[in-house]
Amino acid sequence: MADTVREIERKYEADSTTRLPDLAGIDRVATVVEQGVEDLDALYYDTPDQRLTAAGITLRRRTGGRDAGWHLKLPAGPGEREEIRAPLSDVPPPELTSLVRARVLDRDLVPVVRLRTRRTVRELRDAAGAPLAEVAVDEVWAWPAGEAEKPGAAGVAGRTEARWREIEVELTGGGERDPGLLDEVERALAAVGVHPASAPSKLARALEETGLRPARPEDRTAAVAPGKGVAAASRKNFGEKESGKKGSGKEGAGKKGTAGDLVLEYVREQLRVIVELDPAVRRDVPDSVHRMRVATRRLRSAFRSYTKVLDRGVTAPVGGELKWLAAELGVERDREVLTDRLVTAVADVPRTLRLGPVDARLRIWSERHRAESRDRVLATLDGDRYLALLKTLHALLEDPPLRPAAGRPAPEIAARAVLKDYRRLARRVRTALDAPAGQDRDVALHRARKAAKRTRYAAEAARPALGRPAKKFAKRVKRVQQLLGDHQDSVVARGALRELATQAQQAGEGGFTFGLLYGREEARAADRERELPRVWKKASRRKYRAALRP
């Protein structure tokens, strides 16, 4: 079973002459207690092309010290990492390798570099004797895995042994950990000539100094891309040259860039979000499923909105797979939203009207659906279909199926795409407003909601090119989407309430309270329908669309 700890630490350069200052008395530190010396032996794993290193992730097997075992470290913010630990074993444990599957894809994880560390530890404690932080002075030896069995052995083919000294300061005060203490320690270290380390981690320095240079940050997309070939034929069909059309960086994605720059940067960003959220979804981090689903939908929407830029013959099948992924994630997300809505609704019912074990019935219903949806999400992320989708998206970015319009100015093409989606939305809203009340209108309003979401995403993607007008337009359309979304949530909630009432009746509990909630949801949906003409009138003002035109 894997355990997780939040690591908040800073690293500093040191040499044989470095001496620690007296840290007692700074901030809340009352005493400095010697903790002895530890000998650590760590073997770091990565793909041969160092995909984990490129993403700031480390996976190691370490013996010695107080936390021997497997450690996976994931970035969690400036100076912070989530360290997920598993017991020692001969091979990387599945509970950790699954968390980096979206990074490594189908590549093998192999030993890359070995580090031996002699660590001298001092603990900083407050006046009550509680630990605040650890200060470790590390003597480090590193060499490529498999090329030397012990420090001092010769390196080969330009890869050499590396040796250095460094200082680590890590907060250890549990829930009371204060980063301000690190600032105070840093000032004390600076006063004696100790400065922050240039390398972000021991692994990064080891790879650099042993000749196994990690991928540069600007090459991270390439570092995880599985290969070329998704759309080479597409360019030839459009008579485009191979050079000058592949990929794009951020430098051209603004008002002066091309439409291709704009769209590819947006696609790249959504893929980055999906990959980064993968381990969070697997670990059941709150809101992670929702955010991953949103990125999936945004990506699919970009393919559908910007068909003048990307060849739909190539992107349509990918969009179909993104629709599948969003649907699989939606099972869990929809359950979360529905449960929150029903729990809130029950809490608003006076106790005198809560007849029978309503809370217990709702809890049982929610837990059963949660178990089913959770298993489904994990099965999806562990499946071959999801892996194939990620590989296809990386390949598409490496060799994008650009159409001739991709070379035109971004504002021109972006405005056309957003306005095209707006016209589609307008048609659906008119259809919904004209539909008879009941199921026909519910369906029409749901279709209008999906069109609003697509229009909003198109406008958000266009913001680097169109600026503030796109931001304001997206904000207006979002209000329409939210209103229609609340209406659709009411439709779904009524279905769940019917199911709960039926279960309660069959158990002899009575369904009065669920019937009451059903009626309230009907009234809520009717309110949203009455509000729609007013909200739509504001969102559809001509001035918002006119401002989009370059």
Image (spheres, rainbow, N blue to C red):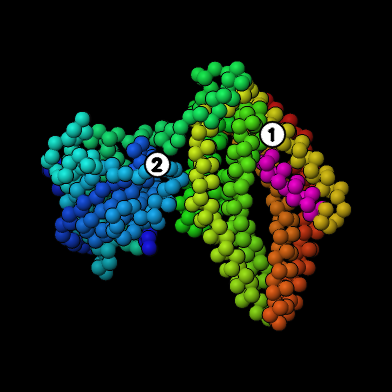
195 is higher (above) or lower (below) than 402: below
Q: Position of residue 432 (x, y in %)?
A: 82, 48
Answer whether residue 22 is visible to the viewer in this image: no
Q: Which corner quadrant of the image does residue 88 belong to?
A: bottom left
Disc 1, SS: helix
Residue 341 among those drawn in magenta:
no
The residue sitting at 32% across, 36% down in the picture is 214
Q: Is residue 61 left or right of residue 231?
A: left
For the point 37% across and 60% down, the residue is 2
Q: Within the magenta stretch, is there residue 447?
A: yes
Label disc, if present, on residue 418 of the rendered structure = 1
Q: Which residues are magenta?
A: 441-460
- x and y percentages locating residue 362 in the rendered image: 63, 72
Mark 2, other Cα within 10 Å: few <14 / some 14–19 / many ≥20: some
Q: Quadrant of residue 161?
A: top left
Pick whichever, 15 or 484, lies toward us: 484
Q: Secondary structure at mark 2?
A: loop
Give the mark nearer the N terminus: 2 vs 1: 2
Q: CA distance from mark 2 to mark 1?
A: 39 Å
Residue assigned mark 2: 107
Question: Looking at the rendering, in which quadrant would you find the N terminus?
Answer: bottom left
Q: Main secondary structure of the magenta part?
A: helix
Residue positioned 73% across, 64% down in the render: 495
Amino acid identity at mark 1: Val
